Image (spheres, helix red, strand yellow):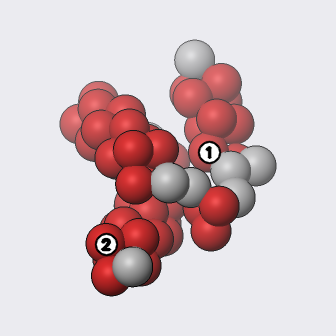
């Protein structure tokens, strides 16, 4: 199931997401981070979280 969950974010263009989409992705990503046991996958999810949080800042500034 890990590979399937990661592929959801793999092709995601964060720069095109709306406020609602960013919030939805962050909610889902938090769930994945809480349940992840693999250090490599955890780091990948953290990387996406940083990208999403940066996008959230951009969207809120507009």
Is 52 placed left or right of 60 in the picture?
A: right
Residue 5 drawn at (x, y percent): 57, 29
Tag 2 residue: 60
Q: Nearer the viewer, residue 10 or 3?
A: 10
Tag 1 residue: 9
Q: Nearer the viewer, residue 22 or 18?
A: 18
Is 8 placed left or right of 60 in the picture?
A: right
Residue 26 drawn at (x, y percent): 35, 47
Q: CA distance from mark 1 to mark 2?
A: 21 Å
Residue 21 drawn at (x, y percent): 47, 44
Toward the top, the furthest residue is 1
Q: Residue placed at 50% from the left, 54% from the top?
A: 18
Q: Residue placed at 30% from the left, 38% from the top?
A: 27
Between discs 1 and 2, the one toward the N terminus = 1
Image height check: is 54 above or below 19? below
Find numbered disc 2 in the image and state the secondary structure of the residue it sits on. helix
Q: Residue placed at 64% from the left, 35% from the top?
A: 8
Q: Nearer the viewer, residue 62 or 41?
A: 62
Residue 43 got which mark? none
Is 15 placed left or right of 48 in the picture?
A: right
Name which quarter of the figure residue 25 lies in: top left
Query: Can see residue 13?
Result: yes
Q: Residues within 10 Å of mark 2 (few under 14, many from 20)?
A: few
């Amino acid at each position: 199931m890990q590979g399937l969950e990661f592929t959801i974010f793999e092709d995601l263009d964060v720069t095109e997401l709306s406020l609602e989409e960013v919030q939805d992705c962050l909610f889902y990503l938090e769930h994945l981070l809480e349940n992840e046991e693999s250090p490599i996958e955890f780091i990948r999810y953290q990387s996406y979280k940083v990208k999403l949080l940066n996008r959230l800042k951009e969207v809120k500034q507009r």
